[in-house]
Amino acid sequence: MKIVGKNGSDFRPAQGEFSTTTLVEFTPGNLARIPANVLFLVDASSSMGGDKWAMVKQALAELVRSFKDDDRVGLVLFHTSAREVFPLASLAENRGAMEEAIRKLENPSGVTNLEAGLKMAYAAFNARGDKDKVKRVNHVILLTDGFPTDNQGYRVEKFDKYEGLVRNEESVTLTGIGIGSADDYDADFISTLSELGRGSYYHANGIEKFREGLKAEVQKLQSSVVGDLTLRFADVKGRIMRIAKIAPEIVVYDIPGNAKNFEIPTGAMNKDRTAFLVQTMSSASGSEGDSLPLWTVEGHYDGQKTDVWNAALKLTGRDSDYAQLDGDVLQGLQVLQVHLNGQQIQASLENGDKEKATRLIENTTRIANQLGSDKVTRALTRLASDVRAGKSVADSLATIKDESKKTRLLIG
């Protein structure tokens, strides 16, 4: 595994505080594919009946057939309670039995007790033991079309317990797929769970988008070469303000305050280049030409580690030294900004500030155009039209969250 890094600019003023953006990239080289432990966590509440349920059953059966013999697959349903249809088990021995179990799934009923489902899903991984999870991708794919409720059917307004369950499972990633209109399920909640789970998010508002999302997940899992890449930061001299994966998709990570040494679990890694932006605030009081160390980072993965990369700057008194931003870093910042602007647009609309939301939509559209992100641009155009007309903007916002998170084709 190779690690390289570059700063937006290698220079900063010799006095005062200054922000720096650093791009850190990992390339897997000739690492071989590793197998996966994949658990499908499926909403089986009454709202999932009819055509949705037939679509889900068919998709699950196709996915069981598409995984390789050395993969393991499990299935948990959640409604008023949770039920394990089959545990994480080898496809080499159980593929036929799994397909039969899916064919016999009963029609959905009850409410949407996601808490029970998450607990049972993670218990299936924990039952395998720590040694069994090494050098494997450990992943949950959540399918739902509704708002989470308690076991009595009352809608849950506070999501801390769900977020805590996902955040605490550092060795298991989670992708959320919201099925149907974003007016019918909480797209912001599902995308947040996916962010905390270091996975993807898909707004499946039609059968084609549903199939597209599942196909993309399978392709990602089938090309995985690292089960869990962890970034280890050390000797932090300034303050790290943000760490975000920007390729092959965007994930923004929690940062442990002012810690000088810490780890960031980032999940599985496939054959694509994996890139992170690290934004640092540093202060200096030195002389022109002095070196200013920022931090060091190395990647740990499946019992191995990369070389250490040292982030550092040179002090200067000339504005011209740090006026030019590296092109790759600038592109990464633009990709991240589109994603973050989507959140700000939603917050502005929820606060009733249409003027601010409109300005953000216009600015974000310009950036998305520059990046060639056609799907995001179209969603932003629809959003602007819906805002002007006073229509529901839930689907457009969910599409922006979905499409702006996927950066594989945008980062050159």
Image (cartoon, rainbow, N blue to C red):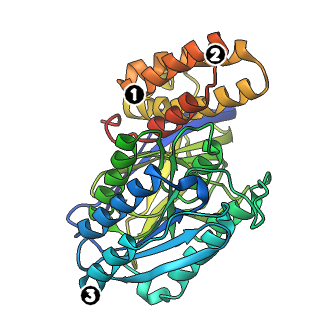
Which of 279/384 is in front?
A: 384
Q: Is residue 166 in view from this perspective?
A: yes
- Residue 53 appears left or right of 100: right
Q: Is residue 324 in view from this perspective?
A: no
Circle 2 residue: 387
The image quarter in which residue 363 lies: top right
The image quarter in which residue 154 lies: bottom right
Image coords of residue 385 (percent x, y): 56, 13
Image coords of residue 251 (percent x, y): 52, 49
Instruction: Specify the amino acid type for callout 1.
Output: Lys
**Point 34% across, 46% down: residue:** 212
Dot 3 surroundings within 10 Å: few (below 14), some, or many (20 or more)?
few
The quarter of the picture where the N terminus appears is: bottom left
Mark found first going from the N terminus, 1 or 2:
1
| Cα gap from disc 2 to disc 3, whole angstroms | 53 Å
- Residue 256 appears left or right of 210: right
**Mark 3 or mark 1, whichever is nearer to me:** 3
For label 3, the SS is helix
**Mark 1 or mark 2, whichever is nearer to me:** 2
| Cα gap from disc 3 to disc 1, whole angstroms | 41 Å
Q: Which mark is residue 93?
A: 3
Circle 1 residue: 375
